[in-house]
Image (tube, rainbow, N blue to C red):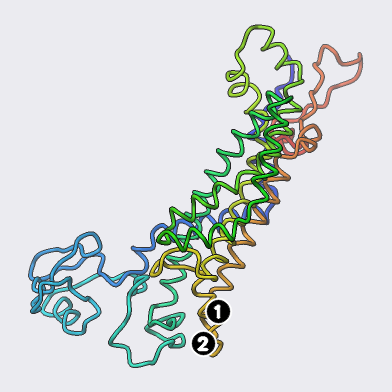
Amino acid sequence: MPVETAILSPRQRAWRRFKRNRLGYWSFLLFAAMLVLALLAELLSNDKPLVLRYEGQYYFPIVKHYPEKTFGGDFDTEADYLDPFIRARITSDGNWALFPLNEYGSRTINYHSTAPDPAPPSADNWLGTDDRGRDLLAQLLYGFRVSVLFAIALTAIGVALGVLAGAIQGFFAGKVDLVGQRFIEVWSSMPELFLLIILSAIFQPSIVLLLVILSIFGWMGLSDYVRAEFLRNRQLDYVRAARALGVGNWQLIRRHILPNSMTPVVTFLPFRMSAAIASLVALDFLGLGVPPGTPSLGELLGQGKNSLDAWWIGTFTFLVMVVTLLLLTLMGDALRDALDPRKTLSEVAPIQPDDDEAPPGEAVHRQPPEAVGLKGGVL
């Protein structure tokens, strides 16, 4: 009977190669953990209780606004849970409130603080406050979330446009490719920063406007990689065979060539996200990024530059930026190595001969499937 060999799909082999790169794999886990914490920012850093019990009833201020009169105050406005009067009302006489670990939101200003702003790290504000009295830890947590979500959206739009443009140029080639390349050359020569300044002066700054402007320029680099892959793959035998069978052009692109041309696209993603985060921070630093009041790492860097005595603002913001970009870079390097086709052939398990094919008088040394998977390097 033939010896069973460990056969894994290319995706499984790539995942195992990625896991073998310990630096890239742990960078992926750490970045994923940071992203999850940022997505749950309201549960970790907020000036409202997650749940409170007042006079026998339960309230959920994190999802619903309650007027101050609900808790014995005098006004119909939303309750300020940092107010000592309200805090005493909801935590005395059998009442209780469950606050997040950090009791400040991204826009919370503690008007009851006795320290001048910007205040250094303390028991109340673990990383200090900025020049407006906002908690720096909350600013970093919410600012990191804005930066990463913006980078994901910008990367997704850029990938969609780049893959579409590169696929059309590479598949049809000829005059289509020639016209497409000339258009890209002209479009890439547009002064992106000047255009952003002009539009920011005309329209009200917003994340959507910034996303649109950066997206119409951010797809050209990826389209070159996709175009090169399509120019190579369109000449292969399986594409010629599908064409001979009458398969249409768009079906050839979607079902046959595109899946085999996605390696540079996937490898490009972490580096594209890193560039998007750096671009947003740079624009925020110059005052051309997100609208005022939005948590921003670039704004914090600007505050650190303007307030050198408040060392904690620039130091902690710079550390968040360095760690984020470093993790994405290490992930990109590991992903590039995992998808390298030159490493695939050397990691396929050799096929063992059958007993019937062994020379007379010689015993065939069999390895268990577990040994084949380890020593043979099968992913």
Which quarter of the rendered picture does the C terminus lie within? top right
Q: Could you tell me which residue is drawn at 56 percent across and 59 percent down? A: 277
**Residue type, numbered disc 1:** Gly
What secondary structure is found at the residue carrying circle 2?
loop
Question: In percent of the image, x 61 and y 44: which residue is there?
Answer: 219
Q: Nearer the viewer, residue 378 or 312?
A: 312
CB-based contact (under 8 Å), mark 1 and mark 2 = yes
Query: Which amino acid, by three-letter code, is at mark 2?
Result: Ala
Question: Where does label 1 land, which residue?
Answer: 314
Q: In this rendering, is residue 2 above or below 244? A: below
Q: Quadrant of residue 80?
A: bottom left
Work out how far the residue at label 1 is from the one at label 2, CA to CA, in angstroms: 8 Å
In the image, is residue 119 above or below residue 142?
below
Horizontal and vertical percent position of residue 260:
67, 28
Task: Tell me the crowding category of disc 1: few under 14, some 14 to 19, or many 20 or more residues within 10 angstroms, Cα based.
Answer: many
**Which residue is drawn at the image coordinates 61% and 47% (left, top)?**
269
Q: Which residue is mark 2?
A: 310
